[in-house]
Image (cartoon, rainbow, N blue to C red):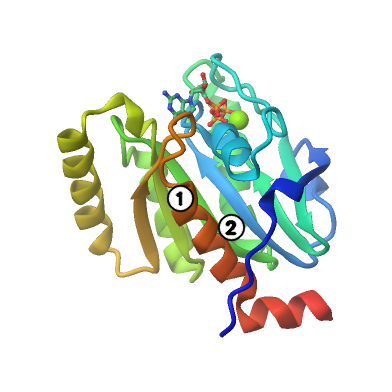
Amino acid sequence: MTIKNHNYHMTRFITSAPDIRHLPQDLGIEVAFAGRSNAGKSSALNALTKQKSLARTSKTPGRTQLINLFEVEEGIHLVDLPGYGYAEVPEEMKRKWQKALGEYLQKRECLIGLVVLMDIRHPLKDLDQQMIQWAVAMHVPVIVLLTKADKLASGARKSQLNKVREELAALNGDIQVEYFSAPKKIGIDKLQQKLDMWFSQPTAQIENNS
Ligand SMILES: Nc1nc2c(ncn2[C@@H]2O[C@H](COP(=O)(O)OP(=O)(O)OP(=O)(O)O)[C@@H](O)[C@H]2O)c(=O)[nH]1
Ligand SMILES: [Mg+2]
C-alpha cells in the first residue's frame, strides 16, 4: 500500500449541521473527532491543519454544538463532533446526543476512522468507553489522543499512556493510543501518519473514485 501524505493545512470548512441527519450525503470518506466536551477536539483539528481558528475552540465547555465538516481534499473529510458529557446540558438532550452519536457510528458508511480525544488527566470515562466499544463493534479503527499532555510531567504522562493502552488492549480492536498536546505540538505527527494511512487504504480509494 502506498501511503500518500496529505496537505492538512489546505483543509477548509464545508458546512455545519445541527444533527447527523443533516450532514451532507454519505459519500467519499471521513474521519470524525469525538470526545468529551472540552477534551480538545477543535484544538487538535487546528493543530493538525496549522490553522488558528478553523475549528472554534473555547474555554467554555460545550462550545461546538454543531457538527462541523471540513474537506482535506475532494472526497476526504474531517468531522468535528460536539462534545459529550457536558454537565450543564439537560439530561434529555444528553440522551438524544448519545443516541445520535451511536447512530452516526453505526450508519455513516463513509466513516473510515475515529479519533477519540480524552484529557490525559481524566481518561476513559463511561462515554469514552462506549464510543470506543461502538467503534470496535463496527470495525472502525480508532486513534486515541490523550490531550493536554503538556499539563503532566513526563513520568506521569508515560504512566497514564501505559494505563490507557493496557485497558484498551483488552477490547481487541484496532486501537492506537498516543499522547497529544496542541500548544506543544506533541503527537501531531502520529495523528497525521494515522490519517494518511486511513486515507490511503484501497477501500478508501475505491469509494472515493466511485
Ligand atoms: N494546555 C492545553 N490546553 C488545551 C489543549 N487542547 C485544548 N486545550 C484547551 O482546552 C480548552 C478546550 O479546547 P477545545 O479544543 O475547544 O475542546 P473541544 O473538545 O473542542 O470542546 P467542545 O467543542 O466544547 O466539545 C481550550 O481552552 C483549549 O485551549 C492542550 O493540548 N493543552
Ligand atoms: Mg470543539
Q: Mark 1, residues whose alpha carbon is within 10 Å: few (<14), some, or many (≥20)?
A: many
Q: What type is the residue that disc 2 sits on?
A: Leu
In the picture of the structure, the residue carrying the numbered disc 1 is 131
- For the residue labelled by badge 2, is the local secondary structure a helix, a strand or a loop? helix
Q: Position of residue 83 (x, y in %)?
A: 55, 33
Q: From the viewer's side, name the closer residue of 35 and 48.
A: 48
Residue at 84%, 81% (x, y): give it.
210
In this rendering, would 99 be left or right of 154? right
Q: Where is residue 45 in the image (x, y as percent from the top left)?
A: 61, 40
- For the residue labelled by badge 1, is the local secondary structure a helix, a strand or a loop? helix
Q: Mark 2, residues whose alpha carbon is within 10 Å: few (<14), some, or many (≥20)?
A: many
Marks 1 and 2, the one that precedes in the sequence: 2
Say whether marks 1 and 2 touch (CB < 8 Å). yes
Residue at 52%, 15% (x, y): give it.
88
Quadrant occupied by the N terminus: bottom right
Where residue 113 sits, quadrant-wise, is bottom right
Q: What type is the residue that disc 1 sits on?
A: Met
In this rendering, would 74 be left or right of 52? right
Residue at 67%, 47% (x, y): give it.
79
The dot on residue 79 is none
Asked whether the viewer can see residue 96, the reply is no
Q: Where is residue 36 in the image (x, y as percent from the top left)?
A: 47, 33
Q: From the viewer's side, name the closer residue of 30 and 156.
A: 156
Residue at 15%, 36% (x, y): give it.
155
In the picture of the structure, the residue carrying the numbered disc 2 is 105
